Image: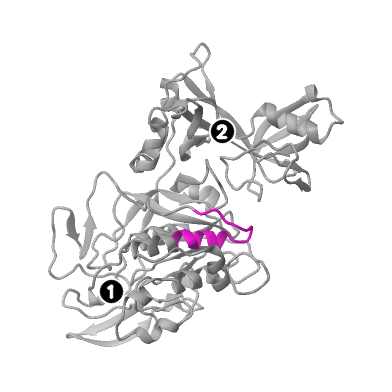
């Protein structure tokens, strides 16, 4: 933790006082915005020749700027005009798998830190180093938000690169708040989902300088910063490395107080718990809210909160954020010989089994701006349709929700047919939810229906193999944190007997056998 928001009260060319923003105290006056420490902030508001008086409700545009070809001053604010939308996607962020079950926070911190350290010419860090510093206790528990924040701040390379009058702060546990990056835990109430999305986007779009922002010095090598946040209401840490909106939430790098209202369409994520399809994803904002951005259910002080650890700008945004609704792909399917009925995508009667539908036509148009995704799906064709039923947990109670996985494949350089991307559609209108892709292709599903039945029979020979049936289901658990990696539900005469994971492990009700001695390589 390095920084708080500050409000500067200015008059006639001088600063009267700097006071910590009330919402940033431990007991914040705002029910929707609260950060975790009350230590003095590093980068508060300060006087310059470009700014006038600032308040917590609105800031004027820079004195010397009124409009340009891409900005218009409206009612004292500069608003970014871009009819094609605005995308920030940090494609250079590396992926890391968590090397231990309780290293998810360490893996996400490693992705973020190595990204910014590589830009500064510094060496990469190991997960052991990150975990040992952020969570020095010997309890082998997952890193909490304060642990992740501490590690991200401490390993900031600019504390060493920059030398100025603030060097005495280099020894702070969370790093020097006046130099380089200044990660902070951002907390929101469970009802403030739009504020949560606003800050994820606004903070990532803010460009970081090597020194305090009011000095107007050079930017760091990688000025936009990925964020760490949890999925599914637990410390299932992921890296969010980009987003798509209708405009830049921070359109003027010389005036961080310009905060236009915006619509958010989707996010790019990297998940340390998933290897292959599901590892890199673009998820719509609506689906992120519905399935992933859930309040924490923990026993610590973060319980019930929506959390991110990210780089904060100098002021809290008051912008209004709209969450773009999911887009139906029903007409696209129909035009390609497919239909959606009761949430299930199927081939139309009499249609050729090779549908003409393309991966590109089923995704959010913003996903097409990802160069890795575009390269992966070029020349692919739909190979099958996998309908998955959503369960509450291993007990088998269905939620009533179903979704469809549409894999797209092609032959690789060796002539093997592999899957390069999978689109997930859901809802009664076949709405686009998310897409995942891999650079070099893979077998998908890693365990097919016949292999799943064989694995099940090998582990419980009391049932005749010819009477075993298999269908795909999913719920988030340690055995699969991604809906792109469903389980095979094995039934005998309509009764569930066990589940088979995509790693070939066997899950019985109340018990997991891992790995199976007959696991598929």
Horizontal relation, residue 85 to residue 511: left or right: left
**Could one spot residue 110 in this view of the protein?**
yes
Residue ID at (50%, 73%) = 150
Q: Residue at x 23, y 55 (%)?
A: 80
Residue 520 locus on image (x, y percent): 67, 35
In the rendered image, the quadrant that contains the C terminus is top right
For mark 2, does the 10 Å Cα neighbourhood hold few (<14), some (14 to 19), or many (20 or more) residues? many
- Measured as percent of width and height from the top left, residue 380 is found at 43, 28
Image coordinates of residue 474 in percent, x first then y, are 64, 40
Q: Does the magenta segment cover residue 148?
A: no
Q: Which colour assignment does the render follow? A: one colour
**Quadrant housing residue 209:** bottom left
Q: Using the image as rendered, state which of residue 281 and residue 380 is in the foreground.
A: 380
Which range of residues does the magenta coloring cover? 96-112
Which element is circle 2 on? loop
Left or right side of 69 for 470: right
């Amino acid at each position: 933790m390095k920084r708080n928001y500050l409000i500067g009260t200015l008059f006639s060319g001088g600063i009267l006082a700097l006071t910590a923003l009330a919402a940033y105290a431990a007991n914040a006056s705002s029910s929707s915005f609260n950060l975790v420490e009350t230590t003095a902030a590093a980068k508060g508001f300060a006087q310059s020749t470009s700014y006038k008086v600032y308040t917590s409700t609105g800031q004027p545009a820079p004195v010397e700027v009124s409009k340009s070809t891409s900005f218009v001053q409206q009612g004292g604010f500069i608003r970014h005009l871009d009819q094609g939308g605005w995308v920030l996607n940090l494609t250079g962020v590396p992926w890391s798998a968590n090397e231990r079950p309780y290293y998810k926070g360490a893996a996400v911190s490693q992705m973020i830190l190595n990204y910014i350290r590589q830009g500064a010419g510094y060496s990469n860090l190991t997960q052991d180093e990150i975990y040992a510093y952020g969570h020095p206790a010997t309890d082998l528990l997952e890193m909490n938000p304060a642990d992740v924040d501490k590690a991200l701040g401490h390993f900031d390379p600019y504390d060493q690169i920059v030398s100025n009058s603030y060097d005495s702060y280099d020894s702070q546990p969370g790093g020097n708040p006046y130099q380089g990056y200044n990660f902070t835990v951002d907390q929101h109430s469970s009802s403030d989902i739009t504020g949560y999305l606003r800050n994820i986007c606004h903070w990532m779009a803010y460009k970081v300088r090597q020194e305090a922002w009011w000095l107007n010095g050079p930017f760091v090598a990688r000025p936009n910063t990925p964020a760490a946040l949890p999925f599914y209401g637990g410390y299932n840490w992921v890296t969010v490395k980009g987003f798509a909106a209708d405009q830049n939430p921070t359109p003027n790098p010389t005036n961080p107080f310009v905060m236009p209202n915006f619509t958010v369409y989707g996010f790019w994520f990297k998940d340390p718990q998933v290897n292959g399809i599901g590892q890199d994803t673009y998820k719509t904002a609506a689906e992120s809210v519905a399935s992933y951005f859930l309040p924490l259910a923990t026993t610590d002080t973060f319980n019930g909160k929506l959390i991110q650890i990210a780089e904060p700008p100098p002021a809290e945004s008051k912008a209004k954020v709209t969450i773009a609704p999911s887009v139906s792909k029903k007409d696209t399917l129909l035009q390609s010989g497919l239909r959606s009925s009761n949430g299930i995508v199927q081939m139309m009667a009499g249609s050729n089994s090779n549908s003409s539908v393309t991966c590109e036509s089923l995704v959010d148009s913003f996903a097409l701006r990802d160069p890795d995704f575009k390269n992966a799906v070029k020349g692919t064709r739909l190979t099958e349709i996998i309908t998955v039923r959503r369960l509450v947990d291993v007990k088998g109670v269905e939620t009533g929700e179903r979704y469809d996985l549409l894999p797209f494949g092609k032959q690789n350089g060796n002539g093997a047919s592999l899957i390069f991307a999978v689109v997930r559609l859901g809802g009664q209108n076949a709405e686009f939810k998310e897409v995942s892709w891999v650079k070099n292709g893979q077998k998908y599903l890693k365990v097919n229906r016949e292999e799943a039945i064989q694995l099940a029979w090998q582990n419980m020979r009391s049932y005749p193999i010819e009477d075993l049936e298999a269908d795909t289901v999913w719920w988030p658990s340690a055995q699969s944190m991604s809906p792109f990696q469903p389980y095979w539900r094995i039934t005998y005469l309509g009764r569930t007997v066990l589940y088979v994971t995509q790693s070939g492990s066997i899950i019985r009700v109340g018990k997991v056998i891992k790995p199976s001695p007959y696991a598929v390589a």
